[in-house]
Image: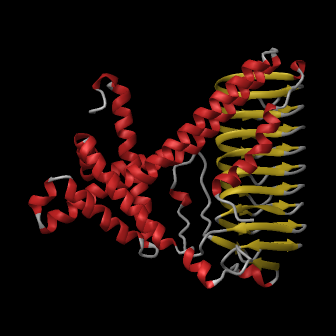
């Protein structure tokens, strides 16, 4: 049952994409697009509604399915069919008579939300507020979830942090991978709607009512006052016993050592190939560390949302091309678009795993050498080696290693984003920028 975040997210997004790309009768669809798309309080749409805009707000009634995308999608009215939405924030305060399929950074089922059947959600944060109700199952894959509403068909999913405060009817099965010691930092992330603070692991509040068996896969026991009255069953993430020799072969230490040795080699190659570029990027981190970390945080938070919007846009384009009988062009659009998205994800991973540590390592090495041998700190070769060795040692320290990894990601990505922005503004400057 062990899955990483990417595979879990893809699994949960698959039904959304399948429904989005399903062929629909041309006469039963109404398209709306613009900066702000609004369905008025007294307005009734007797077709499926496909909407795209900076904001999409539905206060009236949609007699059919609602498919929407944008920065923020809000349903205050009523949908007689399915709600299918992808945005940075998806907020449901109204009624959906059938299923809800949503994806985004912040997902909120408000206190007046009523969902007739299942909710399938994927993203960073999901909140089901007290007073809201879901008639079927609630399935979520992402970082954190706060379930305070009424869930009629059990809870399923995989996440790092889960807190239950509401009523869960039926049997449930969840995978909670987070460490209880991990702080609830999500509320500090930029988001169109407030994010709840959910601590790592499984927490069951005093007001929770779990009317069924809750089986959870976690390395840690559930906590909270509600655990005493809940019917809980915990499973270890891996039920197969591991032999002592196999455990030694699985030790992460050799792999980590070789990784950092490889980063040192990469750093020396970059010193040889692009010394000017490397020095300027490191100077930006040293001169504006908070600004670089802030830009990195924005970039990391915006990347999954951007990918979602691109995928949804591809779905809209392909669906439209299919409606006008251009099936081959629709298929080509999907293939090329998804390949471009895959390339973007690959570049993000490569830069985060390899380029960012070298940039931050050079800055750290110069800082360390300036305290003991200031004349050696002005070069590149020795600071790169010293800095990467220092980062490697810090990464092996429990908890501190996690903070160092976050700092490397944010500082490195912030600097890379600044460089990309400079290249876009001065494309003629060439690779030496």
Quadrant in the picture for the N terminus? bottom right
Write down the quadrant of residue 424 in the picture.
top left
The answer to whether 360 is drawn above or below residue 425 in the figure is below
* Residue 294 relative to residue 15: left or right: left
Question: In the depicted view, which residue is nearer to us: 255 or 417?
Answer: 255
* Residue 385 relative to residue 416: left or right: left
The answer to whether 250 is drawn above or below residue 18 in the figure is below
The answer to whether 136 is drawn above or below residue 47 in the figure is below
Quadrant in the picture for the C terminus? top left
Residue 389 locus on image (x, y percent): 31, 66
* Residue 209 relative to residue 176: left or right: right
* Residue 392 relative to residue 199: left or right: left
Residue drawn at x 77%, y 74% as measured from the top left: 207
Residue drawn at x 59%, y 53% as measured from the top left: 194
Q: Is residue 99 visible?
A: yes
Residue 352 locus on image (x, y percent): 45, 51
Q: Is residue 280 visible?
A: no
Residue 57 locus on image (x, y percent): 71, 34
Q: How many circles with numbers are drawn on the protein?
A: 0
Question: In the depicted view, which residue is nearer to us: 411 or 111?
Answer: 411
Residue 174 locus on image (x, y percent): 76, 66
Residue drawn at x 38%, y 62% as measured from the top left: 260
Q: How is the image coloured?
A: secondary structure
Residue drawn at x 31%, y 31% as measured from the top left: 431
The answer to whether 164 is drawn above or below residue 421 in the figure is below
């Amino acid at each position: 049952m062990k899955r990483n975040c990417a595979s879990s997210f893809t699994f949960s997004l698959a039904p959304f994409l399948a429904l989005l790309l399903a062929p629909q009768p041309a006469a039963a669809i109404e398209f709306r697009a613009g900066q702000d798309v609004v369905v008025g309080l007294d307005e009734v749409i007797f077709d499926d509604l496909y909407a795209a805009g900076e904001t999409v707000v539905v206060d009236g009634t949609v007699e059919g399915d609602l498919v929407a995308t944008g920065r923020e999608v809000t349903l205050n009215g009523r949908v007689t069919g399915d709600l299918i939405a992808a945005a940075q924030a998806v907020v449901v305060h109204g009624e959906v008579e059938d299923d809800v399929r949503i994806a985004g950074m912040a997902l909120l089922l408000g206190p007046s939300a009523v969902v007739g059947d299942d909710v399938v959600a994927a993203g960073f944060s999901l909140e089901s507020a007290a007073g809201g109700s879901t008639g079927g199952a609630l399935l979520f894959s992402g970082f954190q979830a706060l379930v305070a509403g009424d869930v009629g068909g059990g809870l399923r999913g995989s996440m790092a942090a889960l807190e239950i405060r509401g009523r869960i009817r039926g049997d449930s099965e969840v995978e909670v991978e987070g460490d209880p010691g991990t702080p609830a930092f999500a509320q500090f992330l930029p988001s169109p709607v407030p994010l709840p603070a959910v601590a790592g692991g499984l927490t069951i509040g005093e007001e929770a009512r779990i009317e069924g068996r809750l089986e959870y896969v976690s390395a840690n026991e559930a906590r909270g006052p509600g655990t005493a009255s809940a019917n809980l069953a915990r499973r270890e993430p891996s039920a197969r016993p591991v032999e002592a020799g196999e455990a030694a072969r699985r030790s992460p230490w050799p792999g980590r050592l070789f990784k950092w040795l490889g980063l040192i080699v990469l750093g020396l190659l970059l010193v040889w190939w692009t010394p000017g570029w490397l020095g300027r990027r490191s100077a930006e981190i040293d001169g504006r560390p908070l600004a670089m970390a802030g830009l990195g945080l924005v970039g990391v938070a915006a990347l999954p949302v951007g990918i979602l919007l691109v995928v949804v846009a591809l779905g809209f384009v392909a669906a439209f091309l299919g409606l006008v009988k251009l099936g081959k062009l629709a298929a080509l659009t999907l293939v090329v678009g998804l390949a471009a998205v895959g390339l973007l994800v690959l570049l993000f991973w490569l830069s985060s795993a390899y380029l960012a540590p070298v940039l931050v390592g050079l800055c750290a090495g110069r800082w360390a050498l300036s305290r003991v041998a200031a004349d050696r700190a002005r070069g590149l070769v020795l600071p790169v080696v010293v800095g990467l060795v220092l980062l490697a040692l810090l990464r092996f320290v429990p908890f501190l290693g996690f903070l160092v990894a976050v700092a490397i990601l944010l500082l490195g990505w912030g600097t890379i984003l600044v460089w990309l922005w400079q290249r876009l503004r001065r494309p003629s400057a060439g690779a030496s920028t």
